[in-house]
Amino acid sequence: MRNWENNVRRVCPYVPGEQPKDKDIIKLNTNENPYPPAKGVMRVLKDYNADNLRLYPDPSSEELIKALADRYGVKSSQIFVGVGSDDVISMAFMTFFNSDKSVIFPDITYSFYDVWAEVYNIPYKTKPLDENFRINENDYICENGGIIFPNPNAPTGVYESLDKIEKIIKANPDVIVMIDEAYIDFGGESCIPLLKKYDNLLVIQTFSKSRSMAGARIGFAVGNERLIKYLNDVKFSVNSYTMNSLTQKIGVEAVKDESYFKDTTNRIIRTRERAKKKLLELGFIFPDSKSNFIFVSHPNKSASEIFCELKNRKIFVRYWDKPRINNYLRITIGTDKEMDTLFEALEDILSD
Ligand SMILES: *Cc1c(COP(=O)(O)O)cnc(C)c1O
């Protein structure tokens, strides 16, 4: 080992789902949207004058923030945007989780939370989900340094009611409670309206799933304006120009096209409900999902085997070799056609 290595910050990084180069596959492994972004996005990209790239982008992303504020019925001063919600959540951890007490989140959840906690030296504890992958709200009524969980949860797809979430927010007025709503647009109810009652709530959403723009990297947080000010203070202490000007423009177009957004999210919901029926027929078990994926297990064949056999047939889904979930696969909802190919493959795999 070289001496300088004594002074290296060592971390165990998050491992994103595979992005295979091969275009000839059915990609149901990273919860991307199978439909293209809104028409306005295409128009901006087609007409974009590259000379704009000489200039720095608007560091405050004013137009995008205004469009989001209008869409969600809040003030511009209540919105923070970042380069994907991963950037937003990472900034929020840095800004709000500075207590000596542990931040808490579920044992089965988005596997980036513990990575951020480690990289920022934030103490944390996990609370086990029950045997049906549900959150027990009483686990979150205790001394803590902050709370975060997704609703619907990942990778389970389980949605918790606003009542349960409100209980948790209400019982924790001295810390920030972050609700990661990456999948809220697929049938859940957002807790954004609770912002009127609670100043310790931060709601985080993304354009990556319901707005078909994972490649553009846009995420945002909605909260009390004091929270947003603190977030901006940290963001502007790290990098002022995070979101590029082209992305800001296409983000506005995506937010403005409400009818396309409704149409595509509804299509995915319909396909998901059809997939639930089909998967039940094939003998799979799964918690009910309100997201754009289903978390399935099969009594007759191990998840790791099904994962490999699907991969041999060029169908990619997600598998984690982790306690409690190592016999589950997370399957993203694709187009109806992609799902039909998946069902055929599963039928074939299970009949061996
Ligand atoms: C996908 C996802 C995110 C991050 O999405 P971005 O692409 O960074 O916006 C955050 N939280 C959860 C639970 C997710 O599944």
Image (spheres, rainbow, N blue to C red):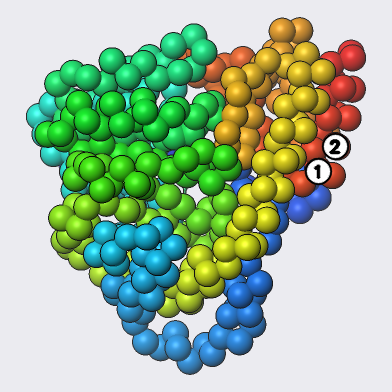
Residue 336 is labelled as 1
- Residue 138: x, y in percent? 28, 15
Q: Is mark 2 within 8 Å of ligand 1?
A: no
- Crowding near the residue tagged with mark 1, few <14, some 14–19, many ≥20 C-alpha atoms within 10 Å: some
Whether 349 is drawn above or below 247: the answer is: above
Give the structural element (helix, strand or loop) at label 2: helix
| Residue 53: image location, x then y, percent | 44, 85
Residue 311 quadrant: top right
Q: Give the number of the disc on residue 6.
A: none
Pick the residue in front: 193 or 108: 193
User: Which disc is residue 340 wearing?
Assistant: 2
Position of residue 16 in the picture relative to residue 149 (left or right): right
104 relative to 252 in the view: left or right: left
Q: Is residue 100 left or right of residue 295?
A: left
**Front residue of 276 and 342:** 276
Report the quarter where the N terminus lies.
top left
Q: Nearer the viewer, residue 203 or 233?
A: 203
Q: Is residue 118 visible?
A: no
The residue positioned 36% from the left and 79% from the top of the image is 57
Whether residues under marks 1 and 2 lie with C-beta atoms below 8 angstroms apart, the answer is yes
Q: Amino acid at mark 2?
A: Asp
Residue 253 in view (yes/no): yes
Of the residues shown, which amino acid type is indicated by label 1?
Asp
* Spatial separation of the CA atoms under disc 1 and disc 2: 6 Å
